[in-house]
Amino acid sequence: MTERPPIAATLSQAPPGAIATALAGDGLWLDLGAASVRIRSDSGLLAAQLLAVYGELPLITHAEWADTHIDIRRGSGLRRWLRPQVVLWCDGQQPFEPFAADSPLPLFEWGCNWQIAHRLNHLLMLHAGAVERDGLALLLPATPGSGKSTLTAALSQRGWRLLSDEFGAFDPAAGVFRAVLKPIALKNQSIEVIRAFSPLARFGPEFPKTRKGRVSHLAATPDAAARRHESARPGAIVLPRWQAGSRTHWEPLAQNTTFPALAFNAFNYTVLGDVGFRAAVALTRQCPAWQLVYSDLDDALATIEAAWPDIVERQARSEQP
Amino acid sequence: MPRFARVEGALVEPVGHLWAAFSAATGETALLNDESAAILEILEPGPASTAQVCAQLSTDSGIAVEVLLPIVEASWANLAAAGLVRTLLEPATIPG
Amino acid sequence: MEDQAQGPGSKVSARRRLIRGAFAAPAALTLYSGSVAARSINNCVARETSGMTPPAPGPVAAPDTFVRVQLQKFQKSPTASYPNAWSRWVRGFDVSSLLASGQTVFVSGTSTTSTNWYLYDKGSASAYALTPIGTIIGTTPVEGTTVQSASQWVALRVASNGDIVGVVGINSTTGTSAVYQSCWTSFRVG
């Protein structure tokens, strides 16, 4: 059974210093929907950065459960003062290289994604963006650089409820997708694209010096945060590919193309064995799939929007007894 | 004459005009054409020799057994590498 | 897209799909080899994580493993002063029952015995509110006599030689503890 923490004020409503106090003490729990994370930190910067991108989540300073426990600690020894660093600890291990001390948020975000991808093994964790509308999930499986996060971000700002920009978290037992609601990490020019696309979108601070270039995190909307425990039935699959200067191209995919796109893009397909196989087959059969090649974001969204009513109708027909 | 058996726990499911197959033994996933999937289907009730498999395929396809024999014989290694079939060793016979 | 219309429950026969008069070479294209995919996913995530070095996938030299142990929740009968007092523990018996014959397990420097209890979570308004996590007691916890399995599990870290070694605590530089709240992997049942 999923344990729900008691209802509390959101991070954005918390009294000044409450987040920092929690991080410095027993921890801050983030209820992401299908996963919960407990964070502790002695970084003086992390509280404000978390507030900027998780502001709509409830402030939880104690819960009975966390799927992963993460500590973001300032570097020790000389690294506390000389080109200071922050380090991520989990289960007594330091799995990743340190980040600059002014960048605890990207370290937490990427490290947390890693932990979630490898631990939530009661779900098939597809590497995909996932949004919901009309109770149905639109899945965007893709390799890095395909424009998945930009497209997911744009959809999330146009009335599609964000489930995750990183995880298509499919529950094989219930046959539904679940939210793992984290801010969307946008890089380089994607930041400006989404700012222009949605001027009211809420971003966290920009980190200019990561190895991937500039990174900034787009916060989930209040609606997505409030509904993060609502599941979504499988709807459709779109494999996006951003290609500079291209016209929008919308091509249906055969199941023998869709199936490997799902299986190959699952973090824990191997771990789940036949459960993962059966889930990937079921999703392949249940969801119509297309490849979307695009360069214009508005046009890409319009293409998806145009196809959606038929998808809703098709799924409604298939669910009738 | 060797016989061939479907590996326990092998799953074969249609995906479009091909078939997805999962080997519980190796954890591998493969895409099969109709011919490979048909062979696995013939082996589902129990092990069979190449000749026995070809006899059934001949009925399904209308192709003569002698034409099918070398084709099927050549396919066992591929299916074994995918973790979907295994060769049953014949028991040794004691002369005399 | 007739192949997209296939329902989840229909049973299709490959033999019936064979075309009369034709028989192609049986083909099996391995899509997914577990170890290869694990490396590729790791590389994928590594690229996403901006050059962060991920843990090595697959077997490494003398890897540790995790085994699941169920948490035991003790609940005090409600009183006016303590309407909801509870704490959660790892039972020594559950740990020792995992040991191979002849193995010795040390938890916080104390040999594991069946009668020990290891504090995992101080809980709510509990008699152990001031007791450090990882404390070992030799008696049944006082919250109550009823043991409720919490339907929650934690992972014991087991070294390659079979010793339960736990993890190094965040705030300690020496020693190991099998029970340290911030260091447990946790996952749910059901």
Image (cartoon, coloured by chain):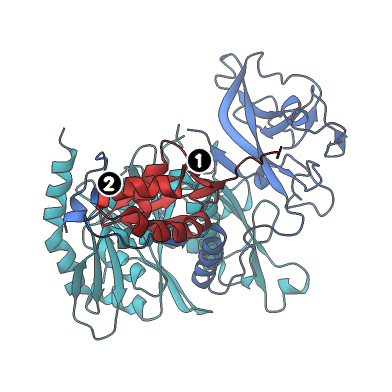
Chain colours: A cyan, B red, C blue
- The residue nearer to you, when weighing A271 against B15, is B15
| Residue name at image x 62 percent, y 69 percent | C53
Residue located at (36% from left, 42% from top): A229
Horizontal placement of C4 versus C136: left or right? left
Residue annotated with mark 1:
B8
Residue that label 2 marks: B59
Q: Is residue C115 left or right of residue A144?
A: right
Tell me which amino acid carries mark 2.
Thr
Q: Is residue A181 visible?
A: yes
Subunit that carries the residue with mark 1: B
Compared across the picture, whether B81 is left or right of C119 comes to: left
- Closest to the observer, C99 or A212: C99
Query: Which of the 4 image quadrants contains residue C150?
Result: top right
Label 2 resides on the chain identified as B
Task: First in sequence, mark 2 or 1: give its number.
Answer: 1
- Return the x and y of residue A317 as percentages of the image width and height: 13, 42
